[in-house]
C-alpha cells in the first residue's frame, strides 16, 4: 500500500491537479490508479531523455503530458478549465536582426511557414520624412509603415497646414517635425530624419531630390524619377556630390510574385523567353488633376502607368532593349487629353530576338497584366502592377496533357518591402537595388518611345551589354 500511495502522490504532484488523493481514488479505483500511475511513470521515464521536447516553464512537464482538464478558480469563485502553460522549444539569437527559430510543426505536404518577423526596436529603425500628403502617401505609404521592420515615419512636409496637423496626430509625428515647402531645407537640422521620401508631382522630383541631398539626407523618390533624362542625371549627380544614396521606388521589383517570375524566366523554367505581352490601363476623370498637365506630369499614360510595363519587362529579362517602335493617340475634343497622350502602344526589341509588346491607356477599365511566352510554356501575371491581388499562372505540356497551374505566394506590402530595403542600404552602407541609374535608363527609353510615335519609325537605342547593368545588389528576402 505504501508503494501505491507513493506512486499516486507522485502522479498528482507531477500533473499539478487540484484534486485530493481521496477524490482521485474514488473516481478511478485503486487498481486503475495503480495502473495509471505505473504507465505514467514509465512514459515519463521513456521521454525524459528528449531534451528538445516542449515543456511547461513551471514544472517542466512535457507538453504531451499536460493535463488540460485542470480547473482554474477565480477570486470570485468562478471555475473554468485550464492547464499549465507550455513553452515550445526555440533558438533565440541575440542578434535583433536574426529571427527566432521555433520548433517545426507542419509536414512537407503543406507550404512551409517563413521566418518569424524580425522587427527592429523603434529606436533602431531608419527615420523617414514624407514629402507630399496626397493619395499615395495617405492611402498606401503611411499605412505601410505598420508592416515595416526597419523603417518609421518621423517627419512630414505639406502645403496644407490643416492636413499636416491631422496626419501628424494620426501617426504620432511631433509638431516640430512638420514642415511647409518653404521650410523644407530645415530638415537638415532634424537628426531623426535619415531618408526623405519624395511623393510629389513629377515636375518637382528633381528640385526636392537635389535640395534633400544638399540637406544631408538620403533620397527615396517615387517613379517616374523625373520629367526628363537630363533631370534624372542632375539628381544622380547631386546625390553623389553629397555622398547620399538615391533610390527610385520601383515597388514591383520588391513584390514576391514579380520576383518569382523573374526567377522562372531567368532560370529558363519553360525554356528561353521569346516574347512578352504587357498591358497597364486605367480610367481617369479629372482634367484638372496634375497628371493631366504636361508641365507637371511630363506626359500621360506612358510615364505614369505605362512605365510599369517597360520597367517590369527589363527587370524580368535582365537585359536592355536595342530598339523601340511606338504609336500614340488621344481622342480629339476630350478635355482629359488636351496636353497628354491618352494611349501609347509600343514594341521593344531585346537581345536574342526577344520582342516585348506593350500598351497603356488612360481611358479604359483597369487592366494590369503581362505574359511571358517561352519555348515550352507561358507565365502569366494578373494584377501584376496593382498594390495587391497578384495572380500567377503557368502553362506547359507534359506528354498528351496540357497543364495549367496557379502559384499562390504570401503577399507582402510592396511599399513596406521597398522602404525596408532602402533602410537596410542606409544601415549597411550599400547601394540600393533600384538606384537613380535604373530610373535614368527608363527615361532614355521613354524619350525614344515618344520620338518614335512622333516620327512614325523605329528608333535605335544605345546598346547596353550585360545583365542588370543599372541595378544594385539583390534585396534580401523579406
Image (cartoon, rainbow, N blue to C red):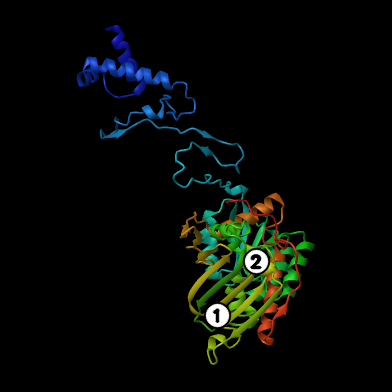
Q: How many marks?
A: 2
Q: Is residue 227 visible?
A: no
Q: Residue at x 61, y 64 (%)?
A: 273
Separation of disc 1 and disc 2 at Cα? 30 Å
| Label 1 element class | loop
Q: In the image shown, does 232 or 201 lie closer to the viewer?
A: 232
Q: In the image shown, does 34 or 448 lie closer to the viewer?
A: 448
Q: Which of the image's four quarters has the N terminus?
A: top left
State the residue lying farthest toward the right: 241
The picture quadrant where one finds residue 234 is bottom right
Q: Position of residue 427 (x, y in %)?
A: 68, 50
User: 226 above or below 168?
Assistant: below
Report which residue position mark 2 lands on: 314
Q: Residues within 10 Å of mark 2 (few under 14, many from 20)?
A: many
Q: Is residue 316 toward the left or the right of residue 362 in the image?
A: right
Q: Residue at x 52, y 69 (%)?
A: 369
Q: Nearer the viewer's eye, disc 1 or disc 2?
A: 2
Q: In the image shown, does 39 or 435 lie closer to the viewer?
A: 39
Report which residue position mark 1 lands on: 289
Q: Is residue 388 toward the left or the right of residue 448 in the image?
A: left
Q: Residue at x 24, y 18 (%)?
A: 32
| Label 2 element class | helix
Q: Is residue 291 toward the left or the right of residue 407 in the image?
A: right
Q: Position of residue 226 (x, y in %)?
A: 67, 73
Q: Position of residue 419 (x, y in %)?
A: 60, 58
Q: Are marks 1 and 2 in contact (CB under 8 Å)?
A: no
Say whether disc 1 or disc 2 marks the residue closer to the N-terminus. Answer: 1
Amino acid at each position: 500500500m505504501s508503494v501505491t500511495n507513493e506512486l499516486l502522490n507522485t502522479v498528482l504532484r507531477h500533473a499539478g491537479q487540484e484534486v485530493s488523493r481521496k477524490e482521485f481514488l474514488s473516481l478511478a479505483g485503486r487498481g486503475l490508479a495503480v495502473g495509471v500511475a505505473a504507465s505514467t511513470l514509465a512514459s515519463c521515464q521513456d521521454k525524459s531523455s528528449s531534451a528538445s521536447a516542449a515543456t511547461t516553464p513551471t514544472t517542466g512537464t512535457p507538453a504531451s503530458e499536460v493535463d488540460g482538464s485542470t480547473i482554474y478558480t477565480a477570486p470570485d469563485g468562478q471555475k473554468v478549465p485550464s492547464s499549465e502553460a507550455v513553452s515550445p522549444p526555440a533558438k533565440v539569437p541575440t542578434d535583433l536582426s536574426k529571427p527566432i527559430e521555433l520548433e517545426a510543426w507542419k509536414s512537407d505536404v503543406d507550404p512551409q511557414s517563413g521566418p518569424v518577423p524580425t522587427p527592429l526596436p523603434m529606436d533602431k529603425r531608419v527615420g523617414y520624412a514624407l514629402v507630399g500628403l496626397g493619395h499615395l502617401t495617405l492611402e498606401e505609404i503611411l499605412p505601410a509603415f505598420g508592416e515595416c521592420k526597419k523603417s518609421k515615419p518621423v517627419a512630414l512636409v505639406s502645403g496644407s497646414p490643416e492636413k499636416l496637423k491631422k496626419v501628424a496626430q494620426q501617426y504620432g509625428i511631433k509638431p516640430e517635425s512638420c514642415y511647409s515647402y518653404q521650410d523644407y531645407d530645415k530638415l537638415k537640422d532634424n537628426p531623426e530624419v535619415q531618408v526623405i521620401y519624395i511623393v510629389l508631382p513629377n515636375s518637382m522630383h528633381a528640385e526636392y531630390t537635389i535640395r534633400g541631398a544638399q540637406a544631408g539626407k538620403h533620397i527615396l523618390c517615387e517613379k517616374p524619377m523625373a520629367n526628363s533624362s537630363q533631370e534624372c542625371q542632375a539628381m544622380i549627380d547631386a546625390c553623389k556630390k553629397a555622398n547620399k544614396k538615391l533610390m527610385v521606388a520601383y515597388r514591383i521589383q520588391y513584390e514576391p510574385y514579380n520576383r518569382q517570375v523573374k526567377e522562372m524566366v531567368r532560370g529558363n523554367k519553360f525554356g528561353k523567353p521569346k516574347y512578352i505581352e504587357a498591358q497597364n490601363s486605367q480610367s481617369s476623370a479629372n482634367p484638372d488633376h496634375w497628371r493631366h498637365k504636361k508641365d507637371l506630369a511630363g506626359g500621360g499614360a506612358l510615364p505614369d502607368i505605362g512605365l510599369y510595363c517597360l520597367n517590369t519587362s527589363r527587370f524580368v529579362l535582365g537585359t536592355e532593349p536595342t530598339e523601340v517602335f511606338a504609336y500614340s493617340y488621344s481622342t480629339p475634343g476630350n478635355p482629359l487629353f488636351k496636353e497628354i497622350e491618352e494611349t501609347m502602344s509600343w514594341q521593344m526589341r531585346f537581345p536574342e530576338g526577344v520582342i516585348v509588346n506593350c500598351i497603356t491607356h488612360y481611358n479604359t477599365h483597369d487592366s494590369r497584366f503581362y505574359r511571358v511566352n517561352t519555348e515550352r510554356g507561358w507565365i502569366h501575371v494578373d494584377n501584376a502592377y496593382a498594390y495587391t491581388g497578384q495572380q500567377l499562372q503557368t502553362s506547359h505540356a507534359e506528354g498528351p496533357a496540357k497543364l495549367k497551374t496557379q502559384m499562390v505566394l504570401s503577399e507582402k506590402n510592396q511599399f513596406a518591402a521597398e522602404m525596408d530595403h532602402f533602410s537596410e542600404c542606409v544601415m549597411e552602407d550599400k547601394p540600393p537595388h533600384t538606384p537613380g541609374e535604373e530610373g535614368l535608363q527608363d527615361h532614355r527609353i521613354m524619350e525614344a518611345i515618344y520620338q518614335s510615335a512622333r516620327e512614325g519609325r523605329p528608333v535605335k537605342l544605345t546598346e547596353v551589354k550585360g545583365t542588370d547593368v543599372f541595378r544594385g545588389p539583390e534585396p534580401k528576402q523579406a
